[in-house]
Amino acid sequence: MKYDKTNPASIFSYSINLLDHSLHDVCGDIVTDNSIKGKGSLGQMVEKFYYEYELNSYRGPDFKEAELELKCTPLLKNKDDEWRIKERLVCTMIDYFEIVKESFESSHFYEKCKLMLILFYLHVYGDEIYDYKFIFSVLWKLPEKDLLIIKHDYETILNKVLAGKAHEISEGDTEYLGACRKGHKGDSPQKQPYSEELAPKRAFSLKPAYMRTILEIVKNKPEHYFCNFDVAVDMQQLVSSEDLTKKSFEEIILDRFASFKGKDYVEICDILEIETTKAKNKYALIASKIGADDIKAGNINESEEFRKSGITMKTVRVKNNDKPKESTSFQNIDYFEIMNNDEWFDSELYEIFSNRFLFVIFKKIDDRKISYVFDGTTIEEDKFILDKVFFWTMPQSDLKVAESYWENIRDCVLNNTISLDNFWRIGDDKKFHVRPKAVNSDDKTENPHGGKVSKYCYWFNANYVQSIIKSQNEK
């Protein structure tokens, strides 16, 4: 053999010869004459033709003797010629009747995916899979701390099945390990053990955000390969492994806000021993400081745990009736991503909206004011106190509305009618709308059809955010 099939490091080292080549380049026409069809077929072809490893029906990892799973996962290049994750990494199908019999440590997912060889390849629309070029190779052992979070994710999904609510599972229920939809439109839903309600077919997957962090690590390696065995990855961490043995990640974060409830901006700055500022995002800055527990993470959204999970913190100031002062914005619409992706579940917007949110709510107190000194000047403004902090997942019914929202945007991009006259507006009262988000009227971006076009972004309506807060009050 050209590698030791019992040794993960040897299998990984041998994979490096694939980089910057396609399977067709390396193995010749045998791959065109004997290609394998279907989802996951590229991985099977790599096993069969490159590793000359006999395909089998073994339930465990692909390289049985090395206890190593092989995963081939696609990348795209965006308009700025940067690498982008195309989709989540599907790991194993969820059998609703089997999962209720297994612990995390005995689960099919853990057995297969605790150690993986991940081969990133460039997906080119219209090309045959054996002509896709491999770009990066990663030998990835799920880190101890990640496993603690993933175990909690697994148990969250399991508990929904045990409660007869498999039909209510959402990718937003969890941090790193998702339960993604599988199958095609029109596929029959599945039976579940503790309810007569049928549930969509789902699979355990590592979320796009988690895969993005792996990509960020390896793409900065000039040699284009990486092994995380005994290697410390330099990312700002919010919690430790020891913390996670006592409480869940979300419980830890919420606990950090508890002692600040009812306090205003100036009082919080005094407790944190930080300078007051006139910055427009000052409430987001103090929320990040509290959630990070004084770790100098800057923006909590850039911490390891938030980046791997895709959690987004949204700081909202509301009136006495819980109505936000303004609608909530997200990132600008990537018209090229919209145009090149015809699948809602693989879209950037689905990832944003189906991920977990951390809402930090500051409420206005009557007509009272606070005052502080900034740059030698006394500032007086409305008094807002820290009122509520909670994690939230968009319900499936709202994700259905979001899918229609995305379809409207995509129609406008495909038809080259990118204009406020054609997008959902705030006055339509459909939960979401499109609005400009640019420095000025001259700040434009590229149009996939050629030329330049105005920058627009995704928005939650203020009324929708109000309904989210009110639903939390009812809980």
Image (cartoon, helix red, strand yellow):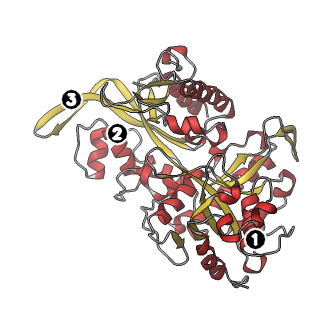
- If you read the primary sequence from the N terminus, does the residue marked by circle 2 or circle 3 appear first? 2
Task: Nearest to the eye among marks 2 and 1: give it.
Answer: 1
The quadrant where residue 360 appears: top left
**Drawn side of residue 269 relative to residue 34, left or right:** left
Foreground residue among 304 and 228: 228
Q: Nearer the viewer, residue 283 or 134?
A: 134
Which residue corresponds to mark 3?
380
Q: CA distance from mark 2 to mark 1?
A: 56 Å
Circle 1: is it few (<14), some (14-19), or many (20+) Cα within 10 Å? Answer: some
Where is residue 433 drawn, in percent x and y?
A: 51, 23
Residue at disc 1, secondary structure: helix
Residue type (three-letter) at the residue carrying disc 3: Glu
Q: Which residue is mark 1?
A: 49
Three-letter code for the amino acid on which mark 1 is drawn: Phe
CB within 8 Å, label 1 to label 3: no
x, y percent for residue 91: 71, 58
